[in-house]
Amino acid sequence: MAQKKSTKKARRIFPKKIPMKKVQRAMAKKAQKAPEEPIVLQTLRGMRDLLPQEQPYWHQVRRSVERAAQEYGFQRIDTPVVEYENLFTRAIGQGTDIVEKEMYAFVTKGGDRVALRPEMTASIARAYIQHGMNVLSKPIKLFSTGPLYRYDRPQEGRYREHWQANFDILGEEDPILDAQVIQLAQRVIQSIGIKNCQFQINSIGTAECRKTYQNLLVSYLESKKQKLCQNCRRRLEINPLRILDCKEDKCAQVSVGAPQTIDHLDPESRVHFKNLLEYLDELDLPYAINPRLVRGLDYYTRTVFEIWSGEEGGKKFSLGGGGRYDRLIEMIGGEPTPAIGFALGLDRLVLEMKKVNARPYRAQKPRVFLAQLGDLAKKKSLRLFSELEKNGILVAESFGRGNLKSQLRHADRMRVAITLIIGQKEALDGTVIVKNMVTGTQETVAKEKIVAIVKKNLKSNIVVLKQ
Ligand code: HAM
């Protein structure tokens, strides 16, 4: 039936007498002739290649994140980069900048409205419901790392594609877990060598107590409307809470006199916040209560926090942020499930590491170089390389070079302890020359014994690494 319909439609477009195949061929030919647009050999604005020289920083950050996740009992979860658009609009909120201005949303060829994820929490909540995690024993601790997409105005530390390490604890409302995720964030940040950062904390209460607070806030802000920036005047209608953390000076001045969320908490939220602060005091974890901290996503309830870079003078970044979202899972169709989580911005952690001269990851350097001369030797060296590598010996080589002198120069530059040489004769004999690069002495060894000899040499004091 559907086919008939489409044939009818096609017939309306193309006269009956022309066979469809002929039309298709003509169209393909025309497409072939159309001048090709030149390829722009550049990443899209706000997106970057993370080149090999950057990777030691990234590796250090990822290692710390993974180690901390394991130590704090988090299990890894990976969710797709693309989800249905309404998951994000409902979870993050219609009036937020992320949903209103920054989503990469599009319609697929199949007609689905989808979006590149601008954050991970909505996907975690979706996965929790989809896979029936509510039957698992609580709390459920999940972590994930991956790229996120926000069509924001790019600048230093703000990209359209950025990376986060995201931690969430689902199924528990005890404030000790709020303290534990903050402790975890601090652990990761300190372990990568960032000593100075500030934890900014606030409680925005439940949706119910926020209603009363919001009315007070709106009437205060209405009286100062003329002093607000254009954007905040609009926010007054759709998301007045966001005005509190507007970065414009004039709005910040207005916010100073605004009613504060912590003065309008319901009794349970007040106790929750008080307990959290007591846990943090017990941990000796320094924090600042920031009554203007409201976060840019609508799903938060009670605890919200951000970690700011501690650099004196220069621009402060939020290195990470999070909070409680006790209603989110219920709001998108699951059963009531309290939850808390946060995400660290990996791009910003790397940026901060560089600013404070923190040490990047240092990969182990090979202490053995494998050189070869002649076609047969080249063939043998590939097998020898694999044998050494399987035995846990890191080996450097420059297989592409034929000239022995230049290979040895390369080995010298790499400051290896041993160079193994296979020439034409050794290839035929089944032997390998073992050259001590410190003393310059060398011996010829049967290839069956080479792994043992190399290991012995590397262990013994004979080989002293040149520095
Ligand atoms: P968020 O504050 O929107 O929270 O993002 C977390 C962190 O990601 C920020 O503190 C910042 O370091 C980094 N970040 C955000 N946008 C950019 C950007 N355009 N370029 C570079 N870095 C950026 C969330 O996304 C929540 N989902 C966190 C959460 C998890 N809440 C509960 N669980």
Image: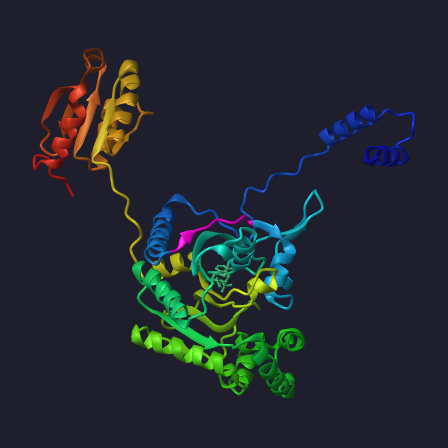
Establish if 96 lies above or below 112: below
Q: In front here: 394 or 94?
A: 94
Residue 405 % position (x, y): 23, 25
314 with respect to 377 (left or right): right
Q: In front here: 5 or 233?
A: 5
At 7% from the left and 37% from the top, the residue drawn is 461
Q: Which residue lies furthest to the top in this view?
A: 428
Q: Quadrant of residue 435?
A: top left
Q: In front here: 188 or 60?
A: 188
Q: In which quarter of the image is residue 396?
A: top left
Q: In front here: 119 or 405?
A: 119
- Asked which colour scheme the image uses, the reply is rainbow
At 65% from the left and 57% from the top, the residue drawn is 86
Residue 266 % position (x, y): 52, 82
Quarter of the image with the C terminus is top left
- The question of residue 245 being in magenta is answered with no
Does the magenta stretch mainly form a helix, a strand or a loop? loop
* Res 315 visible: no
For the magenta stretch, what is the residue range?
74-81
Establish if 299 lies above or below 108: below
Q: Quadrant of residue 233?
A: bottom right
Establish if 344 lies above or below 75: below
* Count of numbered tags: 0
140 with respect to 128 (left or right): left
383 with respect to 330 (left or right): left
* Res 429 visible: yes
- The question of residue 77 being in magenta is answered with yes
Quarter of the image with the N terminus is top right
Residue 185 % position (x, y): 37, 63
At 70% from the left and 42% from the top, the residue drawn is 109
Residue 273 % position (x, y): 43, 78
Q: Residue furthest right?
A: 16
